Image (tube, helix red, strand yellow):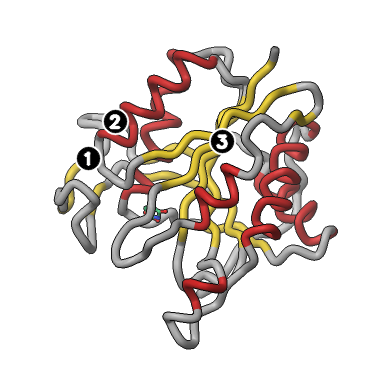
Amino acid sequence: MRKILLTGFSPFAAETTNPSWDAVVALDGAIVDGAIIVSLQLPCEFDRSLQVLEQAIQQHQPELVLSLGQAGGRVDVTVERVAINVNDARIPDNAGQQPIDTAVIEHGPVGYFSSLPIKAIVEALHEQGIPASVSHTAGTYVCNHVFYGLMHLLPQYPTVKRAGFVHVPYAPKQAAAHPGMASMAVTTMTKAIRLIIETSLHTAHDIHVSGGITH
Ligand code: PCA
């Protein structure tokens, strides 16, 4: 059976949950367009996150890999455009590592673009009333590390036709502990992920609309 690999992260920093995982695990075993979803939790750790991800790609040979992470403070679902070859951690990861200005992959290219139809995804989410936008930075912490490492791996795994990364805001219970921060219900995130998968499976060529920002 065709497979889709969905990943979310373990909680990190002072959080006890990570909405990226809570939203992703809800879809484990779901069938979308005849493909079955395999949900996988990645540790919020440099290096080991990528080892766990590669092992799952080897095992499942998915046709689509969609990784998600929490971006506390963002106001909507952000579809990442680009991963960069930089680790620069603001805080230590869950294993206590805090790389500063190192490469994700020594001598790798500066960056990789998502191969998801990012504009069509944002449009599909808006049509269903879900706040979303294109993001031009996945940061320089473990999420960007996984996104870059994922895109770098793909030539070795030709069954994977498309891959990319999406950040989600805090869940409401997290935002309650961070006054002033935006949040989104995890059930809305799960609905968004299903739409992102459907759009990625159905859209051969991305649409030509602006996703640019000037700030
Ligand atoms: N968010 C972090 C790492 C794990 C996660 O969920 C990030 O944006 O890098």
Above or below, 15 against 110 in this view is: below
Report the residue marked by disc 3.
6
Name the residue type under label 2: Gly
Q: Earlier in the sequence, mark 1 or mark 3?
A: 3
Name the residue type under label 1: Ala
Name the residue type under label 3: Leu
Q: Residue furthest bottom?
A: 180
Query: Which callout, 1 or 3, points to the residue nearer the camera?
Result: 3
Residue 152 placed where, x, y %?
Answer: 39, 27
Crowd tier of the residue under label 2, counting other residues whose Cα lies within 10 Å: few below 14, some 14–19, many 20 or above: some
The residue sitting at 33% across, 40% down in the picture is: 110
The quadrant where residue 201 appears:
top right
Report the residue marked by disc 2.
108
Viewer-closest of 158 and 34: 34
Q: Earlier in the sequence, mark 3 or mark 2?
A: 3
Residue 164 numbered tag: none
The residue sitting at 58% across, 28% down in the picture is: 38
Residue 98 placed where, x, y %?
Answer: 16, 53
Determine whether the residue tagged by mark 1 lies in a helix, strand or loop.
loop
Rounded to the nearest angstrom, the CA distance separating label 2 from label 1 is: 8 Å
The quadrant where residue 33 appears:
top right
Viewer-closest of 16 and 160: 16
Asked whether, in this view, residue 81 is left or right of residue 124, the answer is: left
Crowd tier of the residue under label 3, counting other residues whose Cα lies within 10 Å: few below 14, some 14–19, many 20 or above: many
The quadrant where residue 72 appears:
bottom left
Q: Quadrant of ligand 1?
A: bottom left
Viewer-closest of 169 and 203: 169
Q: Earlier in the sequence, mark 2 or mark 1?
A: 1
Crowd tier of the residue under label 1, counting other residues whose Cα lies within 10 Å: few below 14, some 14–19, many 20 or above: some
Report the residue marked by disc 1.
103
